Image (cartoon, rainbow, N blue to C red):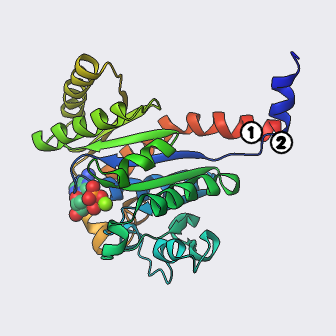
Amino acid sequence: MTELPNQQKMTAPPRATVFAVTSGKGGVGKTSIAVNLACEFSRRGLRTVLLDADLGLANAHILAGMRPTKTLCDYIDGTATLADIAEHGPAHVKFIAGGSGVQAMADIDAEKRQRLVGAVEDLRPFCDVVIVDTGAGVSSNVIDFLGAADHVILVTTSNFAAIADAYGIVKVSVQNGHKQPIHCVINRVRTPEEGEQVFAKLLACTKQFLGFDLNWLGVVPEDGCVEGAILKRAPFTEAYPGSVAARYLTKLVTALISKVQKTTQTARAAH
Ligand SMILES: Nc1ncnc2c1ncn2[C@@H]1O[C@H](COP(=O)(O)OP(=O)(O)O)[C@@H](O)[C@H]1O
Ligand SMILES: [Mg+2]
């Protein structure tokens, strides 16, 4: 009987680590960060998929300079498989585009949403990292994807409303039984200290009122190169690799990569 756990490990297939990038408030930089995290993981040799789950307002493909022919709408309709939708993006990231400006996607019912969330699970055997770019807010379209992830990356700016909404999404997630780690990125900061102060405030609230600990991940400074890269239809770590934003973004991946290697190496060793 004592042998059983090892025997189970021997048959466990390799399994990607899933990171969901989310925020309470929209427009805080989730998609910019999700796309660039995916590129940086990929540049470090990990097979990476970016899944655009901002249902109805998907735009990760625009930031990546892509014109997808198929989207998750086709997957939901049953007319395409995930393999049909996935396209090669910058830095060899596989992109799974969401449906943009499609009300049917924003209003999907629970059954279709479960199919979409299940897509995340279906991707795991085929890559090392899945980055899910979620929408903003506390709807089931967001919360269900957070529940499917191994790690949540919570993005906020120093804006008071953005911090309050970041707290809101942690609250709803925790009330829904969320247990996975939530790592905070404070975006568009003028100084690293500004980000640390925002994190300290947010952490104090989640500890006191929810009994939930948040993890510090890092900051991305305000940098005109982020907008400049969007205008160029390229991820900022590709268009401006020497920029301040790109340098800080790569630090986030350095901090996250140990989480990936743990899961993937355990799975690979067991395979
Ligand atoms: N670090 C940054 N510095 C400057 N502008 C930024 C930064 N991060 C995001 N932005 C700008 O904020 C806007 C919203 O970013 P986006 O990634 O689309 O946010 P979200 O996905 O949260 O809605 C974009 O125009 C982007 O250029
Ligand atoms: Mg977005």
Q: With respect to residue 21, does 174 lie above or below?
A: above
Residue 114: horizontal and vertical position, in percent?
Answer: 50, 56
Q: Which residue is mark 2?
A: 271
- Front in this rendered view, residue 105 or 214: 105
The mark found on residue 267 in the picture is 1
Residue 111, given in percent of the width and then of the height, sits at: 48, 60
Q: Residue shown at 34%/22% (left/top)? A: 212
Q: Secondary structure at mark 1?
A: helix
Question: On the picture, is 42 further left or further right than 71?
Answer: right
Question: Residue 85, can we see it?
Answer: yes
Residues at discs 1 and 2 in contact (Cβ within 8 Å): yes
Residue 47 can be seen, yes or no:
no
- Single out the residue that lies furthest toward the left: 160
Above or below residue 54? Residue 197 is above
> Residue flagged by tag 1: what amino acid is it?
Ala
Q: Amino acid at mark 2?
A: His
Q: CA distance from mark 1 to mark 2?
A: 6 Å
